[in-house]
Amino acid sequence: MKHLNEPSFRESVDLMFNRAVALMDLPPGLEEKIRVCNATYTVRFGVRLRGKIQTFTGYRSVHSEHMEPVKGGIRYALSVNQDEVEALAALMTYKCALVEAPFGGSKGGLCVDPREWDEHELESITRRFAYELIKRDLINPSQNVPAPDMGTGEREMAWIADQYRRMNTTDINARACVTGKPLNAGGIAGRVEATGRGVQYALREFFRHPEDMAAAGLSGSLDGKRVIVQGLGNVGYHAAKFLQEEDGAVITGIIEHDGALYSDEGLDVEAVRGWIMKHGGVTGYPDATHTAEGAAVLEHECDILIPAAMEGVINLGNAERIKAALIIEAANGPVTAGADEVLRKKGTVIIPDMYANAGGVTVSYFEWVKNLSHIRFGRMGRRQEEARHQLIVDELERLDRHLGDAWVMSPDFKQKYLRGAGELELVRSGLDDTMRIAYQSMREVWHGREDVTDLRTAAYLVSINKVAASYRALGL
Ligand code: GLU
C-alpha cells in the first residue's frame, strides 16, 4: 500500500519510535531493548483440503514481554508477512501501555484469503494453526492471548478457545486463552463494537478540549462535522454508525475495496453496510456518487478522516493532497512515517493509532478479567444498586405526593434511575474512562512540552515511559 521507496511498515513504526526516544533520557541500551521484537515464530503447516495437502504460512510475533501475558490479534489476509506482523506487535506494546492494559505486545497472522474457503475448511485451518501455537505456549491464558483482527472474528476465536480447551482439559482458566469470543463461549458484551466505540469516545474526548480543536482549525461539537471513512469493516462501520446516530456527524464519504461513495448530504451508514453485505461492495448503491478510484476520496474536503482499513494508505504519494483537518487512525499504521512528516508540516492533527484504536484491546482486557474471575460483570451488584435507587425513588414519590404540582419528577427519571448497570453498561463505562484518561495523558505532554508538537510523539513518550518503568521494576 505504501508509496514506492518508502520504508517498510516495521521501519516506519521504528522511525516514529526513534523520533520520540530522541526526546527522552533513557538509560543506555534500553531504547534498543524496547524497540526490537523479542521473537517471531513462523509456522508452515499442511491441511488436507479439496483432495490435496494445502500448505499455509503463519506467524506469531512477540514484541515485548515486560508484562505477561502478551496480547494482540490474529490477522487473516494474503498480504500477511513477517515485517507487518512485527510492526503490529510493536504497536500492541505501545497501545497496551498507553491505555494501561497490563499486557506486553504481540500479533499473529496467517497468509490466507478467508473468502476462498468455506466455513468448514476455515475451521480446519484455524484449528491446525491454533494447535501449532498452543503447543508452543504462543496461545496461553498467562502467556499469550490472541484476539480478532482483520479477516477474523468471534467465530475464529471460538474455534481457537475450543482447540485450547481440548489440549488443556484441566486448565480452569482455559477460556482466558483468547478474547473476542462469542458471548455464549465466554465472550463479553460490547467487544464486537469495542474498537469503533473507542474511536467515538476518542473523538468525543478530543472535542471536549477547545484548544485541541483549535489546533486542527475546528470548533464546536461533533454535530454536523463532515466525516470520510475508509473501510466499512467491523471498526469503520461501528465508528461511522455511532458517530452518525449518536453525535450527529455527517458521513459524506465511504471508501471500500471497489470504489467510494460520496454525498454532501450524508450517507446512511446502515443502508450502505446492508448494501455491501448483499452485493459484496459499494458499486451500484443508489443515493450517492460512486468513484471507481476509491483512494481519490481520501483527498476530498472534510473535517475528519477515519482510515479504518489497512496500513500505509496515507503515504508520500497522497499526503500532500489530504485536506482533512483531523485524521483519526482507526486502523493500525494507516499513515506512513513519511506522510506523517508531511501532514505535521501542513498542520493536520492526527490522533494516533496506538490510542485511537485501543478500544478493542481495552475491552479484551475486560473479557480476560471476566474469564479469570469466572463471573459476569455486574452480577453481584446490580440488584443491590437497583434496590438502593428504589429507596430514593420511593422517597421522592412521597415528597411528590406531599408537594403536589409544586414539584414533579421528569417522566423518564424514574425508569432511567432505577436501572442498575449490567455488563454492557459497565464495559462502556470502563472503555469511556480508559479513552478519556489516555487522551489526557497524551495531551498533557503535547501541550506541556515545547519539543513535542504532535499527538503521536506524545503518545509514544507516554507509553515508552511506562514500558521503561516496567523494565526498571524488573531490574533491567
Ligand atoms: N486486533 C486488535 C488490535 O489491533 C485487538 C487486539 C486485542 O484485543 O488483543 O488492537
Image: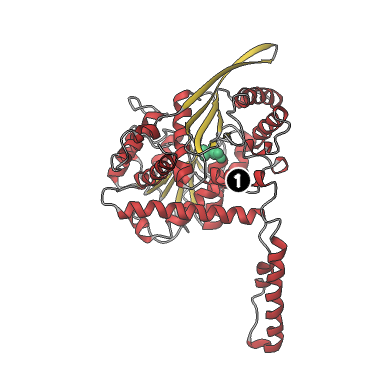
Which of the image's four quarters has the N terminus? top left
Q: Quadrant of ligand 1?
A: top right
Q: Is residue 366 left or right of residue 33?
A: right
Q: Amino acid at mark 1?
A: Ala
Crowding at dot 1, Cα within 10 Å, few <14 / some 14-19 / many 20+, comes out as few
Relative image position of residue 101 (x, y in whole percent): 52, 45
Identify the residue under disc 1. 271
Residue drawn at (60%, 47%) of the image: 366
Left or right: residue 396 versus residue 326 is right
In the image, taking residue 113 as reference, residue 383 lies left or right, namely right
Residue 370 point in image, percent of width and height: 65, 47
Can the viewer see residue 271 in this picture?
yes
Colour scheme of the rendered structure? secondary structure
Q: Position of residue 421 (x, y in %)?
A: 66, 60
Residue at horizontal 66 percent and vertical 31 percent from the top:
160
Quick check: 430 above or below 121?
A: below
The quadrant where residue 215 appears: bottom left
Is residue 258 in sight in this rendering?
A: no
